[in-house]
Amino acid sequence: MSTVGKAISLLEMLGSGAPETALADLAKCAGFDKATTRRLLVSLIAHGLVEQDETTRLYRLGAGIARLALMREAQFPFLRMAAPVVEQLAAETGETVHLSEYSKRGLITVQVIESAKANRVSVQLGDVLPMHATASGIAFLAFTEERVREGILTGPLPAFTPFTIGDVETLAEHIATARARGHSTGSQGYEEGVLSVAAPILGADGFAIGTIAVAAPQVRIHKGDIERHGASVAAAAHEIGERLFGPQGLPSRKRA
Amino acid sequence: MSTVGKAISLLEMLGSGAPETALADLAKCAGFDKATTRRLLVSLIAHGLVEQDETTRLYRLGAGIARLALMREAQFPFLRMAAPVVEQLAAETGETVHLSEYSKRGLITVQVIESAKANRVSVQLGDVLPMHATASGIAFLAFTEERVREGILTGPLPAFTPFTIGDVETLAEHIATARARGHSTGSQGYEEGVLSVAAPILGADGFAIGTIAVAAPQVRIHKGDIERHGASVAAAAHEIGERLFGPQGLPSRKRA
DNA sequence: GTGGTTATTTCATTATTCGCAACGGCATTT
DNA sequence: AAATGCCGTTGCGAATAATGAAATAACCAC
């Protein structure tokens, strides 16, 4: 593995789990030597991506991470543009709404507004959603490049619940349905008892760059709710796309 | 420079400047070989920290950055806790308010609420504020560890305007005054025509972890305004500290 | 087509990183 | 109070991974 790869996996380890981590724990979990781990951390600290508590010697993610994220948001204001639409959709549906952005590793949850109801679906910020097991994933696959879709269809489809789609044919069907309808549905594929409806947010090139989804406890979804929510998420997704890239279909500078 | 250092400087280059950058530009600006630059980028792409447009071949910061930042925010909800206080202070003063967090490189601007007035101070998200030339910096220095303060006092004090504090004695005086008052003032040290008032946000150990500041055009500040705003920022800073760490003075788990 | 530009790949060289092991500090234990 | 165990830090030869020049491939404009 490349050196930067190791450094980044340290960052990810620092991000997951406890807020602060000891050197020995990091080294053990990552499988690197203590010396190696520390040298990598020193490099990261020099650039502000990691901080170390002077007294406890524990390591944590640094403010440099936030800086990079802010610079990125300034260049491509995904959250700033999408946030009001997400809030509006949450208010309209009364259910948990979450927004995600595509990355090589999966769909990254970048905003969540939880339902005010006591029985609600909870999604963690920063969570990575599997493509084949969530409504968001299906919606994304239905509107992404052939290459990416093939990558998922030919890869493994790990089961998260007994209801997770496990075979390629069923998955392809769901994707086709989603493409035809403009929105997807997910039924307990990732968490039991949760129904979701999602729609893709399209980029300037017409391919999906992220998704927006409504997630609700199965017991609360009645006849017609799916269709209603489906129309709402699709409208919201379209609205976000227009806010980011101008009227859809009109060729505009990408991500400008 | 270490390999990860190079990789991180690429990330910073991608963050500053245009939203998307060509390989040749990156290599030239960073001073690396094209081959080296590309290999580093490939490693970063593999981990989602950088993305490449398939058609234009341009590189940009990836969603992995946002993911790390979200995980960090989940561990240490600085923004989530501070945001309402910042908004409140902005509403109360009617001027631009900005929040910053300490990092080895300086004070990183993590939130800005601009005044609604036509003539207003504008601060960029992600900007790094110099310690010696801003009200925020002075406030921070007044309440940081001796070691950090010494580092600044013994280092160079580059001038950004003709008013930037250039000698150590004056700087030390300003710091002492700020420590006594609980808030600092900055007068055109970073941008001409801008007056600022800042207060430190204290961590569990009593040392500053960031600052909150009010910035206004000099012409709008009248007698008494500085004192009034000073009291307001100090109160806001204290409020943020309490939200993060519980009642100040009470020993609590750090950053928990 | 053709020329010029830019991205990507290849490969031998070299510098950097690696992991072992020893050192030093700190706190709890005996 | 001395000893023990744990963790972080540092030094050094071995080995791996990074490097840069040059070749190749893709692309665009003309």
Image (tube, coloured by chain):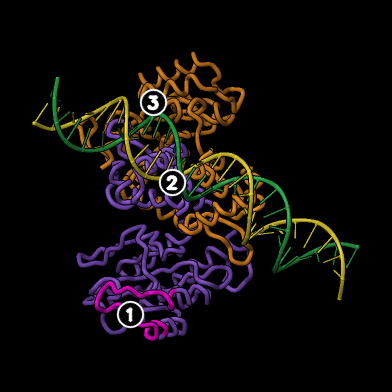
Chain colours: A orange, B purple, C green, D yellow
Establish if A187 lies above or below B192.
above
Q: Name the one closer to the observer, C25 or D23.
A: D23
Please state the chain letter of the residue tagged with numbered disc 3 in the rendered image: A
Q: Residue B165's mark?
A: 1
Between marks 2 and 1, how big is the CA–CA gap? 36 Å
Q: Position of residue B59 (x, y in %)?
A: 33, 40
Judged from the image, the secondary structure of the residue bearing numbered disc 3 is loop
Q: Amino acid at mark 2?
A: Ile
For the residues carrying marks 3 and 2, which lies nearer the camera in this image?
2
Q: Position of residue B115 (x, y in %)?
A: 28, 65
Crowding at mark 2 (Cα within 10 Å: few <14, some 14-19, many 20+): many
Q: Any magenta on residue B153? A: yes
Does the CB distance between marks 3 and 2 fall below 8 Å?
no
Judged from the image, the secondary structure of the residue bearing numbered disc 1 is loop
Between marks 1 and 3, how big is the CA–CA gap? 59 Å
Q: Residue at x 41, y 39 (%)?
A: B39
Q: Residue A183's mark?
A: 3
Q: Position of residue B6 (x, y in %)?
A: 42, 50
Crowding at mark 1 (Cα within 10 Å: few <14, some 14-19, many 20+): many
> Both on one chain, marks 3 and 2?
no
Q: Any magenta on residue A242? A: no
Quadrant where the image shows the N terminus of chain B = bottom left
Q: What's the magenta bit mostly, secondary-structure-wise?
A: loop
Where does label 2 land, which residue?
Answer: B65
For the residues carrying marks 2 and 1, which lies nearer the camera in this image?
1
Q: Name the one closer to the observer, A225 or A66.
A: A66
Please state the chain letter of the residue tagged with numbered disc 2 in the rendered image: B
Using the rendered image of the protein, determine whether residue A126 is visible from the camera's viewpoint.
Answer: no
Query: Left or right of A132: which side holds B229?
Result: left
